[in-house]
Structure formats: C-alpha cells, structure tokens
Amino acid sequence: MNFSQQLSLIKTLVPEGEVDTRIDCPFCNHTNTLIIRRIDSDLFWNCFSASCSAKGKHEGEMSMQQVYETVVMKEKEKEKDFVMPKSFVSIFSTDKCTDYLKKNHCIESYIKGKAKIKYDVKQHRAVFLIKEKEKVKGAIGRGLNSQVYPKWFMYGSKTYPFICGNSDTAVLVEDCASACAVSETHTGVALMGTSLPDRYIPVLKKKFKKVIVALDRDATTKAFDISNQLRYYMDTEVKILEDDLKYFDKPQIERLFNE
Ligand SMILES: [Zn+2]
C-alpha cells in the first residue's frame, strides 16, 4: 500500500483528537504490532513487524484551538516586545513636529513627562508612545502633512489605549493629541475613533473611578453608547464638544469641565 492508502486506512481506525494506541496491524495482520499516535494534528503510525512496511507521518490541518494558540498567542508575544523603530527620534529634530505639538496643546504633557512623544523620520509623523506602566506597548503616529496617509497610523499593539495623565478621572477623547491636551486637568484616553473597543474596558475599570466621554457633537449618540457600556462599572458622564479638546489650552479646558 502506498502512503495515501495507508493514511486513509489509519484514519478509519482511530477516533479524532489525541491518540496513543497499539492495535493489530491491518497491513500485515500481525497481532498488536501497529502503533498509532496523534499529537496535535500530526498522525504517526509504525508497525513493529519485520515483514511489514506500514509506517508514516501525516501533518494534518490545525484545529481552531491550534490556530488560536500558534497565531494569536504569537501576536500577543509580539505585543509584549514592541521594538522601537530606529526611525523614532527626538521631537526636536524638526520644527514641523514641535509646531504640531504646540498647536495641538501636546507639548506641555511632553515637557511635564506625562506623554512620551517621538518624531518618526521615515513616516514623517509625530508619534505618541503607548505605555502600560513603564513598558512601551506600541505607538500611534500623526502624519505631519496632508501627503502622509493614513492621517493616524498604529505601530505594534492595538490592545492597549494611549493614556496620558495621573488623575483617576478619565476623559475619553478621539485622538492622542486631545488626550495630551486634557491631561492638564484629567487623564486623557484616546479612543482613536468614536467607539470604545471592548479590550479597553478592563483597562478603564482597573485604572479609573470616573469616566467622562468627551466627543464631538456629530458623535453624540456614540458618546451615550459608550457611557452606557461603562456605567455598570464606574461613574460616567457625557460631555458634548463644540470643538476638539486639542485646540483648547489649560484655562479653556478647566472652564469646559467646570461648567
Ligand atoms: Zn504490520
């Protein structure tokens, strides 16, 4: 029997899943000489009879569980070890970068050490580093002119939000620049859009007593959706904005939240 004939016969002899068995060999008819093992999805068989040539190894398709373990777990491994690209340099390397950070009220958070920001020479972006405690897990870069596409780019992990500030009240905002601006009075958390990714919920639960969802008037419905998602875990509030928080300086932000 050739390999594929042996394989189809072996498959009919054993159940799904892990197998480690010794049976009568259907190829040579000797008693208890055929060993069959399936480890993960790989099937091995071997007959100990000297006169028998039954022997083979078949690497099968991966089950969903195995796909998860090999692919998804490896992705998670990658997140742990975000390697900062060599193209990330000081924000002071170009005026374009510092100008952007000043105009969008981010420079204060950088100077006060609340935000780690770099300039990506290669992509011409102001890059906000995503940190969990002191570990850098990824980064989010803002293109510094209209030719840079997409406007916002995610480097590495997307499982953890960009957070800026030390307050136990979080303000959920649309982007990193607004998160930096609001860190003057609260802790800014960048959604990078107008919806709340599920994977951010445990982070918010753990770190904050209160969350204020501060989105643009266009996203009012979404702001209330987010507030509803979180209200079981902590105090929530919705603040509808007439303009992005990144255009506000500290006194303006203070006024806005004291209204
Ligand atoms: Zn045999």
Image (cartoon, helix red, strand yellow):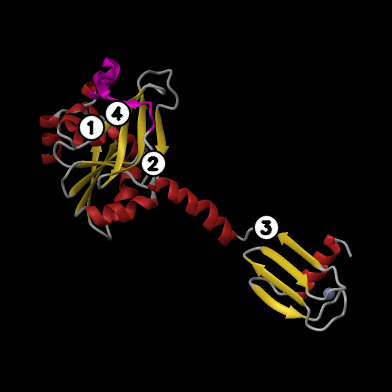
* Residue 179 at x, y percent in the picture: 25, 37
Mark 1 vs mark 3, foreground winner is 3
Which of discs 2 and 3 lies nearer the camera? The answer is: 2
Q: Residue at x 73, y 79 (%)?
A: 22
Quarter of the rendered image showing ligand 1: bottom right
Q: Please say if 43 is above or below 102.
A: below
Magenta residues? 85-101
Label 4 crowding class (10 Å Cα cut-off): few <14, some 14-19, many 20+? many
Instruction: Examine the rendered structure and indicate whether residue 42 appears above or below residue 226.
Output: below
Depicted 107 relative to depicted 8: above or below: above
The reply to whether discs 3 and 4 touch (Cβ–Cβ < 8 Å) is no
Number of the front mark, 1 or 4: 4
Between marks 3 and 4, how big is the CA–CA gap? 44 Å
Q: Is residue 28 left or right of residue 113?
A: right
- Indicate if the residue with disc 4 has its beta carbon within 8 Å of ligand 1: no
Report if residue 229 is visible in the image.
Answer: no
Label 3 residue SS: loop
User: What secondary structure is marked by label 1?
Assistant: helix
CB contact under 8 Å: marks 4 and 2: no
Residue extending farthest to the top is: 95
Residue for badge 2: 82
- The residue to which callout 4 is attached is 118
Q: Quadrant of the C terminus?
A: top left
Instruction: Tell me, yes or no, whether the highlighted magenta stretch contains residue 95.
Output: yes
CB at mark 2 closer than 8 A to ligand 1? no
In the foreground, 156 or 183: 156
In the image, is the residue at mark 3 within 8 Å of ligand 1 by its beta carbon? Answer: no
Q: Earlier in the sequence, mark 3 or mark 4?
A: 3
- Separation of marks 1 and 3 at Cα, in angstroms: 51 Å
**Spatial separation of the CA atoms under disc 2 and disc 3:** 31 Å
